[in-house]
Amino acid sequence: MSPMPKVEVKREVWLGDEADLDGFRRHARECLKDGIEPSQVEWRVATRAEAELFGNMPNSDEPTAAHESTTLVKVPAFFVPLSEHAALHADPGRFGLLYRLLWRLADDNALRHNPLDADRQQAEHMARSVRRDMHKMTAFVRFRPLAGAYGEAEREGIQHVAWFEPEHHIVEATAPFFARRFAQMHWAILTPERSVHWDGEGLTFGPGANRGDAPPADAAEQLWLTYYASIFNPARLKLAMMQKEMPRRYWKNLPEAALIRPLTAGAAQREHTMIEQSAAESLRRRPAASKALAVVRRPIVVHAPGSLAELRSMTERCRECPIGAHATQVVNGEGNESAPLMLVGEQPGDREDLRGRPFVGPAGQLLNRALEQLGWPRDRLYLTNAVKHFKFELRGKRRIHKTPAQQEAAACLHWLEREIALVKPDAAIALGATAARALLGRAVPVVKERGQWFTREDGLRVLITLHPSALLRMGAAEHESAFRQWLADLAVAARDALR
């Protein structure tokens, strides 16, 4: 077998440092002008001292006459921001990839409209990784005040120092964020490759540092850890999502990371304790200035309603959580007041909020379709929600559904329990996680426990299944099979509760 022919390198290009984007642009234009193919260019990165030692790098601060005469290269709009981020990637082949892509874009118009091209996708992947690293730096840098042992830094006026270990060459690109965010504070950020100092007027960049050059924890940090532990809510813990947003490799430099393992290990027990605690009496302190309004601020429910009509009248005045102040009206349950089966959803939607009736929007239409196929007359059932007001956020003129917080659902729980006490159903169907938690008093993995019966302490049997809105969010390909499975869940109630 004959050996592969060796590609002759016609030009060796030296860049001033790992983030020398200006140098890359200048040399790339020059190579493109001279017709140097990507395979004939060798991109090298070195410090100025190394370049001068080997005599291979022109002075990047003083462009040569050839550089000055370089004509501009027209590139599509996507390439400029793409190259600005991809050039900061840690991959040593990034400059070769970007020049190859630039070379092809100058000659192939079809490439401009082909986002699936292998080179373009690789560059996009690099750019996304760099942007993610920049975002993590803005989120996970922790400044610490200097102590007396850091004389040189203190002589430079530095007050706070942070240590960070970026994955890519992002320090110079991310530093302006901290200059804007902490404009009145003199600070320095140290990384293994690069350091940056802000003196209140300008940014100064220098060589990398060691972790030991950053100050240790102080008393203020202990206060932060105490606060972090106190606001931890075990009921809202999503460990996989947390690790996605805060990868483990950042933990060693985050003070609060030391608390993550013990807090997550005890989350289940803390949640159980929170649920078991009595909610009959509020422990919140009322400011002295508001004591005169004590009568007005007391909960409106002073006695148990004796009928559903009285219950509806009371819920109309409910302001025990913030949702009621923004909704159009309260949406109470409706249906047969002695129904053998109660269906409980999460909360009213936009249509329900405007009409004042439950399950009349898209999710309600899907529920009606299921009831027809099961042969359940809607007027034989009682339909309600765990939360009686519509929680939303405005996006332009649209009101977008927001899931009620656990505290908001808890504030509405006594209304639901009074409905159950007045209707006296033989069984209830919990449509979704919010309804299941309200009915069973615990976090419920709906997908795992769907189609199963659970019995409460008061004897009420509860069947778990999906909320119809969950089916509406599915793609068309899986919608029909999901609907059939949902019907199978509901059919369990038809067999066991509507006999």
Image (cartoon, helix red, strand yellow):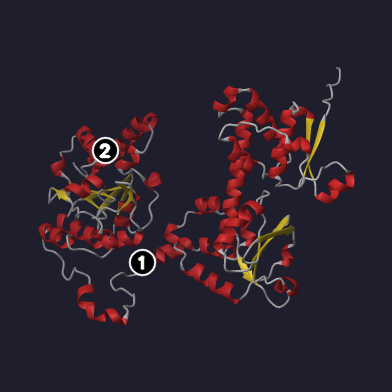
Viewport quadrant of the N terminus: top right
Relative to the observer, which residue lies in front, 113 or 322?
113
* Residue 255 visible (yes or no): yes
The amino acid on which the numbered mark 2 sits, given as a three-letter code, is: Ala
| Pointer 2 local density, CA inside 10 Å: few below 14, some 14–19, many at least 20 | some
- Give residue 491's mark: 2
Left-right relation of 34 to 476: right
3 shown above or below 415: above
Q: Residue furthest top?
A: 1
362 shown above or below 244: above
Left-right relation of 273 to 279: right
The amino acid on which the numbered mark 1 sits, given as a three-letter code, is: Glu
Q: Position of residue 316 (x, y in %)?
A: 17, 60
Left-right relation of 267 to 395: right
Viewport quadrant of the C terminus: top left
Q: Going 59% across and 76% down the picture, which residue do you hit?
A: 219
Left-right relation of 262 to 389: right
| Pointer 1 local density, CA inside 10 Å: few below 14, some 14–19, many at least 20 | few
Q: Position of residue 69 (x, y in %)?
A: 73, 34
* Residue 458 visible (yes or no): no
Which residue was labeled with disc 1? 276
- Give residue 113's mark: none
Q: Going 34% across and 41% down the picture, which residue do you hit?
A: 470
